[in-house]
Every structure is written in structure tokens, then in C-alpha cells.
């Protein structure tokens, strides 16, 4: 959001509080704009039949849902892996069912999986795989990840990675992305990495960038934000995925 729009919105609110509170209001306003854009985008969608979502809290927000929808709809990926079962899963598995694409969601909580399956509509499938959590040491720091994730991914190649799990760690959070960036990306790829306003996720993303740079891999990235922040990283041929919003 540019400075002119920011000032205009603050004048509408007639708000003169401290900057921190102004930032909170701006986040809420941006989220509201994303909600409107998301609902407008999906209104006539043929493949997204069930359009009820509950963003916010621990779940992804409307900015994430909007960008994910645009990526699925415009990129049309064929091999998708998602970490963390939630609101985004409702969209991903409707997409994969309608277009007959391959998608898998990795989740550790079996009770949550049972609740999700019971609650969702029955006209689309949901390929969910349970992997337990474990703590590993990465560069001297303890970080939470999925047990056996490297074996599960093995020699698979994915063109869309959606990283919203496991629960964040203080350092090198969701570190499974590091090895996946080295071993499991298609030539044309997109990564959506949630919660990159946090230091642990930023450290993991820095490791991915370092690997790409060391191996002279062309890529581009964009951080989107409203209530929270997430980062889209993609191959250069998918540059348009970093231009989905101001």
C-alpha cells in the first residue's frame, strides 16, 4: 500500500493515535481490501464450488487466500505439496479434484484431520498424509519439523509448495523447506511460505535464497502482507506471481 493511500485511509478514519496503532489499522484495512478482492475473484469460479472460508487467528488470512487462488487459477500447477492442514487445504483440494491434479497435504494431528474430513463437503477429495513432528538441530538451533519428510518426498518434484506448518520455531522455522528447495522443485516452481514476518521463517528463507544464489538459479520473490506476511518465491518464468497486488 503506497503512502498516498495510507494517508487517505487514515484521514477517512480521522485517526491521530500513535504510529503503532496506525499500523494496526492499516493492516485491518488491507485485510478488508483483500477480502473484497478475494470474494470478487472467486464469485464466478467453476472449480471453487465451496466458497466458505474462516481466515484469521492461527489460520491464513485473506491476503494469503487471494494470492493462493490467483496462483492456482493462473499457474495451474500439476504437483502440489502443502504443509499444515487448514483453510488453504479447502481450496487446494477442490482445485486438484476439479482439474485432476496431484496434491497432498502433510499434517501431524490425526484428530484435526478427522475433524476436517467430517466438516468438509463430500464432493471433492482430500489427500492427507500424517507425519509426526520431531525436533532437529540445524546450525546449532533446535527447530520443529516433520519426521521422515525427506523420505516421503524422496525424488518427487513439485511445482507448488505451500508451507504453513508445522507450528513455528524461534530459529530456522519450518526447515523442511531447505532440503526441498534443493531436491524437490520442478524447473518451473512456486513456493508460498507463510509467516515470513517472523525471524525463524526469515532465517529459513535466507537459507533457500543462499542455495539458489550459490547454484546460480534464477528466481524472484515478493512478500505480501495484511494481518500477517507471507512470501512467494518462484522461478523467473512465473514472475507474474510476484505482481498480484500492490
Image (cartoon, rainbow, N blue to C red):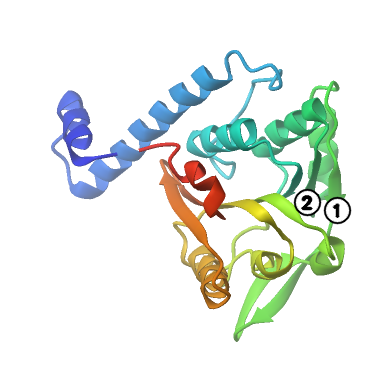
Q: In the displayed image of the protein, which residue is found farthest to the bottom?
A: 140
238 shown above or below 205? above
Residues 7 and 15: in front is: 7
Residues 104 and 77: in front is: 77
Q: Which image quarter is the C terminus in?
A: top left
**Residue 215 x/y as whole percent:** 58, 75
Residue drawn at (78%, 28%), measured in percent from left and top? 99
Sequence order check: which comes first, mark 2 or mark 1?
Answer: 2
**Tag 2, which secondary structure?**
strand
142 shown above or below 149? below
Instruction: Bin the neighbour count of mark 1 within 10 Å (Cα to Cα): few under 14, some 14-19, many 20 and up.
Output: some
The picture quadrant where one finds residue 217 is bottom right
100 shown above or below 238? above
Name the disc covering residue 67, or none.
Answer: none
Q: In the displayed image of the protein, which residue is found farthest to the top?
A: 44
**Residue 163 shows in this picture:** no
Q: Which image quarter is the N terminus in?
A: top left
- Residue named by callout 2: 107
Q: Is residue 1 left or right of residue 44?
A: left
Residue drawn at (30%, 38%), measured in percent from left and top? 26
**Tag 1, which secondary structure?**
strand
**Residue 78 x/y as whole percent:** 75, 42
**Residue 117 x/y as whole percent:** 84, 33
**Residue 137 x/y as whole percent:** 67, 81
Report how far apart the C-alphas of labels 2 and 1 lie in the structure.
5 Å
> Circles 2 and 1: CB distance less than 8 Å?
yes
The picture quadrant where one finds residue 91 is top right
Q: Is residue 105 left or right of residue 173?
A: right
**Residue 183 shows in this picture:** yes
Instruction: Bin the neighbour count of mark 2 within 10 Å (Cα to Cα): few under 14, some 14-19, many 20 and up.
Output: many
- Residue named by callout 1: 130
Amino acid at each position: 500500500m503506497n503512502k498516498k493511500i495510507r494517508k487517505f485511509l487514515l484521514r477517512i478514519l480521522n485517526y491521530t493515535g500513535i504510529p503503532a496503532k496506525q499500523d494496526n489499522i492499516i493492516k485491518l484495512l488491507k485485510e478488508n481490501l483483500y477480502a473484497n478482492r478475494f470474494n470478487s475473484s472467486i464469485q464466478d469460479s467453476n472449480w471453487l464450488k465451496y466458497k466458505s472460508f474462516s481466515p484469521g487467528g492461527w489460520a491464513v488470512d485473506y491476503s494469503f487466500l487471494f494470492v493462493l487462488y490467483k496462483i492456482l487459477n493462473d499457474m495451474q500447477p500439476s504437483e502440489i505439496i502443502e504443509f499444515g492442514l487448514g483453510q488453504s487445504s479447502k481450496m487446494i483440494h477442490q482445485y486438484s479434484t476439479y482439474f485432476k491434479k496431484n496434491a497432498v497435504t502433510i499434517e501431524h494431528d490425526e484428530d484435526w484431520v478427522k475433524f476436517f474430513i467430517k466438516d468438509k463437503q463430500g464432493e471433492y477429495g482430500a489427500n492427507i498424509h500424517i507425519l509426526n513432528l520431531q525436533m532437529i538441530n540445524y546450525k546449532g538451533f533446535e527447530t520443529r519439523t516433520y519426521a521422515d519428510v525427506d523420505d516421503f518426498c524422496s525424488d518427487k518434484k513439485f511445482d507448488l509448495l505451500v508451507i504453513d506448518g508445522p507450528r513455528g520455531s524461534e530459529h530456522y522455522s519450518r526447515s523442511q523447506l531447505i532440503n526441498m528447495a534443493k531436491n524437490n522443485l520442478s524447473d518451473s516452481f512456486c513456493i508460498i511460505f507463510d509467516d515470513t514476518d517472523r525471524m525463524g521463517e526469515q532465517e529459513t528463507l535466507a537459507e533457500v535464497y543462499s542455495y539458489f544464489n550459490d547454484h546460480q538459479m534464477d528466481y524472484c520473490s515478493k512478500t505480501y502482507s495484511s494481518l500477517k506476511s507471507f512470501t512467494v518465491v518462484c522461478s523467473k518464468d512465473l514472475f507474474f506471481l510476484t505482481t498480484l497486488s500492490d
